[in-house]
Amino acid sequence: MNIGQEILEILKEEITESEYKRYIKQLMYDVKKSTADVAIFYAPNALVVNWIKNKYTEKIEHLFEVKMTHKVHVKITLKNLTDLKKPKKVAEVKQGSSLLNPSLSFSNFMVGGSNQFAYAAVKSVSENPGNVYNPLFIYGGVGLGKTHLMQAAGNVFQNEGLTVIYTTVEQFLNDFTRSIRNNTMERFREKYRKCDVLLIDDIQFLSGKEGIQEELFHTFEAIKGNGNQIIFTADKHPKKIGGLEARLQSRFEWGLVADIQPPELETKIAIIKKKCEINKVQLSKEIVNYIATVIDSNVREIEGILSKLHAYSQLMHVDIDLEFTKNVLKDQMKEKRENLTMDAITEVVAKDLNIKPSEIRSKGRSKNIVYARRIAIYICRELTQNTMPQLAQYFGMKDHTAISHTLRKIAELIDNDEDFKVKIDELSNKITNIE
Ligand code: ADP
Ligand code: MG
C-alpha cells in the first residue's frame, strides 16, 4: 500500500461510510508525480474535486503531517481533461429551428396562479383559432414558459392539419434578408402570409429594426385579414418595448395581452415533479422541495439542475440525496457567477433600456445614458470580480476614483429612489438568470 492509500484508509475510519464510498474512495494517489512535500490525488470528475477540496483537503494534509512529521501540500485534480466535459442535458430542446418540439405540450405544462391566465388564453386560442383572441400576445421573464405555451398551441394546430409557422424574430429577419438577396420575396410572402397560424417568438428583438417591422406589419394585416391566427411572445408588455412603429405596437394589443409571472412555490414543485417524471429522474420529496425553494424563478434553470443531478449520479453511481443536491446547486451557482462578464451585463442592461452597449461604455452625458451606465457599473461591481481600475477602463472613465465616486452616487440613489432600486433588482435577477 502506498502512502496516499494509507492516509485514505486512516481517513476512512474518521468519516461516515457513505461519504467515504461516494467521494474518498474515488480518489487515486499518483505515486510517480507525488513528492515528499506534495501529494497528488486524482478524482473522476469536477464534483468530487470540489467536494474534497472544500471538505477534506485540510484533513488529509493534517493526516500526512502526522504521519510524515512535516507539512505536505495536497493537490486534488481531475484525472484527465476529457472529464472536464460538461454533462449533456437530459432533454435537449432543439434551438434555432422553426420546427415545433412535440414534447412541449399542454399536458406537460404545469398550471398555477402565476401562469393560469396565459395558459387559459393560449388554450382557448388553440381550441378556436382566429376567433377568440387575435392576436394573442404573451409576455413574461426568461424561462417562464412562453415558448412552451406557444409551441403547445402550435402542436395542437399541426395535429389538426393546419399549416403552422413557428419562428423567432431573428429567424424571420434572416429569412427576410435572404429573400431580398435571392430575389425570392414572393415565396417569402406566400409562406408567411398564407399560413393558418403564425407564431412569432421573442418580439422584443424587433426593437429598432425598421425594415422588418414594416414587413411584419403587412404580414400581420394579411393573416388577420384572412381570419387566421397569430400569437406573439415577448419579454415585456408591448407598451414597454421601445423602438417599435406605433401602428405595429397598437396591433399587438388588439387581441389579448396576457402575462406570465414567476412560478410560486407550489407550481415550482409541480414543475420539478413533472420534469423528473419526463426525464426519469427519481428525487425524494425533501429534495424536490429544496430545489424549489432555492431556485427563485427560472424554470429553465430548474431543468439544468435536474440534468446535472442526473448526470452526476450516473457518473458516480450514487443515489441523489440532499447533501449531494446541495453541493451540485452550490456548484451551479458558483459556475454561473464565474461565467458572468461585463460584456454580458452591459448587453442586458442596454437591451432593457433600449440603448446600445457602446453608448453605455461611451463618455455620453445624456440622462438615459448616464442612468444605464450607473446601473451597469453597479451590477458589474456586485456580480463580477473586476477591480475598480478594471471597471474604470471598461466604462471609459478616467480612473478608479471616478468609479468610486459613481458607486457612492449609486448607493445614494438606491437609498432614496425606489424606482432606481427596483430597476437594479430587476436587472440583477435577469442577469443572474442568463444561461
Ligand atoms: P421562455 O420562452 O418563457 O423563456 P420556455 O418556454 O423556453 O421559457 O421555458 C423554459 C423551460 O421551462 C422549458 O423547458 C419549459 O418546458 C419549462 N417550463 C416553463 N414553465 C413550465 C411549466 N409551467 N410547466 C412545465 N414546464 C415549464
Ligand atoms: Mg422563449
Image: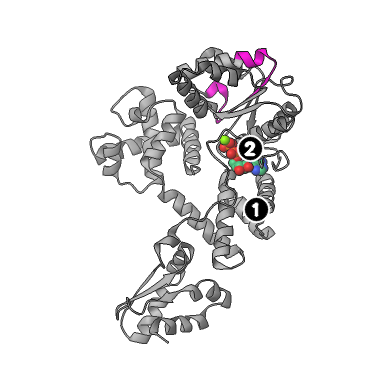
The residue identified by callout 2 is: 148
| Residue 279, label in figure | 1
- Vertical placement of residue 392 versus 372, above or below: below
Q: Amino acid at mark 2?
A: His
Q: Residue at x 32, y 32 (%)?
A: 361
Q: Position of residue 322 (x, y in %)?
A: 60, 63
Q: Is residue 88 left or right of residue 321?
A: left
Report crowding for label 1: few under 14, some 14 to 19, many 20 or more residues within 10 A (C-alpha): some
Give me the residue at 76% from left, 28% from top: 127
- Whether residue 356 is visible here, answered yes or no, is yes
Ligand 2 shows up in which quadrant of the image? top right
Answer whether residue 411 is visible to the viewer in this image: no
Circles 2, 1 touching at the beta carbon (< 8 Å): no
* Quadrant in the picture for the N terminus: bottom left
* Image location of residue 87, percent across then percent down: 51, 56
Toward which corner of the image does residue 415 lie, by quadrant? top left
Q: Residue furthest left?
A: 398
Label 1: state its secondary structure. Answer: helix
Residue 154 versus residue 135: which sits nearer the camera?
Answer: 154
Element on which disc 2 rests: helix
Mark 2: few/some/many CA within 10 Å (<14, 14-19, 20+): some
Q: Quadrant of residue 189?
A: top right
Magenta span includes 235: yes
Q: Residue at x 45, y 72 (%)?
A: 56
- Residue 97 is situated, as x and y percent measured from the top left of the image, at 55, 35
Q: Is mark 2 within 8 Å of ligand 1?
A: yes
Q: Which residues lie in the magenta part? A: 221-240
Q: Is residue 393 above or below residue 81?
A: above
The amino acid beneath tag 1 is Asn
